[in-house]
Amino acid sequence: MLDELDYLLITVLQHAPRADWRRIGAALDVDATTAARRWTRLTESGLAWLGCHPNPAFIGDLIVAFIEVDCVSGKLHEVCERILDDPPLFNIEHATGARDLLLTAVFRSQAQLARYVGFRLGGLDGIAATRTQLATALHTEGSRWRLDRLAGERRSTLGAARDEPVPATVLNQSDLDLILLLAQDCRQSVARLAERSGLSPTTVRRRLDRLDAARAISYRCEAARSVSGWPVSATLWGSAPAAEAARITSQLSGMRETRLCATLSGPHNLMVTVWLRSMGDVHLFEAALSRRFPELTVVDRAMTLWQLKHAGQVLDPQGRHLRTVPFSDLWDDRAAAVAESELLNRMRGPATRAQQG
């Protein structure tokens, strides 16, 4: 179990993930050594961790997809093991209800998504069916969620928060490479990043300052959900009139429990994932939604039994951290590419194939 100092430390790192231990200790009223030692204990036990990934808003046009997977009986964990290291898969959840797995994935194009679903997932033994919906808008996501254990005066010790991000252009490949290096250890020093990237320390520091000022890096400091105080994760699908959807998603995104809120392309136009204090809170939360948004109809719901992959982090059934799979929207699967090429060749028709062969 975590004590109050552990929760405070996690909250501090949610607000200032790369602050030095002296400033972190000052915010907690402990010395730097105590703060560092606490964090080492939390990370080594898998009860807390830091991660980061490029902010999708700075990569260009991306496709965010939610893929429901039905597995052949007895094959679920085998399927999970096969897809666990696929870079575009942000989340892998073993869920209740009308699906075995719920995947959150990010791709460069609809063609890349179609190749992944049709040839990667479609070619795996153990997958019986898939259903895919696109996020037409992503209103909030988990990197913005906080434990909120930190009073305002403690946050001020960490430095003034920037109200508005500094405008930035789309990330170039050098920026993306640096963020992927940082994702392997968010608190590694500038000198270490410079050594690994081949850039000078001055260049690394300047580039990180620019990316941080623009909020082009999404940091996450998480606690294992079993000890976070929010052990229950539920995903709700809903339908709302198109004219009311913007107002509803805006308010949903600001609710304390909300981790993710998206507008969908499918038959049900809203999706929200919430973290709750207990299983009994699921129906209480849904009842509160009905009172607050009478025009919103909840049409389906799923409880997360095991989040095997969360924002690129591999977790055990208790939500403890095992290892990191650096997130990337770039995906190149040779077998899928070959299968797609063979299909296209067949689609050209017998005459074309005869000419080629």
Image (cartoon, rainbow, N blue to C red):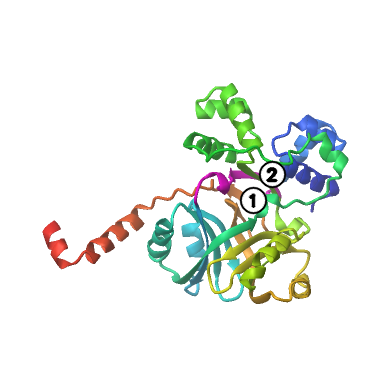
Q: In this view, does 29 lie to the left or right of 71?
A: right
| Secondary structure of residue under mark 1 | strand
**Does the residue at mark 1 contact the one at mark 2 (Cβ under 8 Å)?**
yes
Residue depicted at 80% across the width and 50% down the height: 148
Amino acid residing under circle 1: His
The magenta stretch spans residue 106: no
Circle 1 residues within 10 Å: few <14, some 14–19, many ≥20: many
Q: Quadrant of the C terminus?
A: bottom left
Residue 262: where, in percent of width, then height? 61, 62
Q: Earlier in the sequence, mark 1 or mark 2?
A: 2
The number of numbered discs placed on residues in the rendered structure image is: 2
Q: In this view, does 122 lie to the left or right of 317?
A: left
Quarter assignment of residue 32? top right
Task: Name the one closer to the observer, 188 or 202.
Answer: 202
Q: Can the viewer see residue 7?
A: yes
Amino acid residing under circle 2: Thr
Residue depicted at 80% across the width and 48% down the height: 7
Residue depicted at 79% across the width and 32% down the height: 23
In the image, residue 111 sits, relative to residue 270, either above or below, namely above
Q: Can the viewer see residue 303?
A: no
Residue 253: where, in percent of width, then height? 70, 59
Task: Name the one closer to the observer, 251 or 195.
Answer: 251
- Residue range (magenta): 43-61
Residue, disc 2 = 43
Quarter assignment of residue 240? bottom right
| Secondary structure of residue under mark 2 | helix
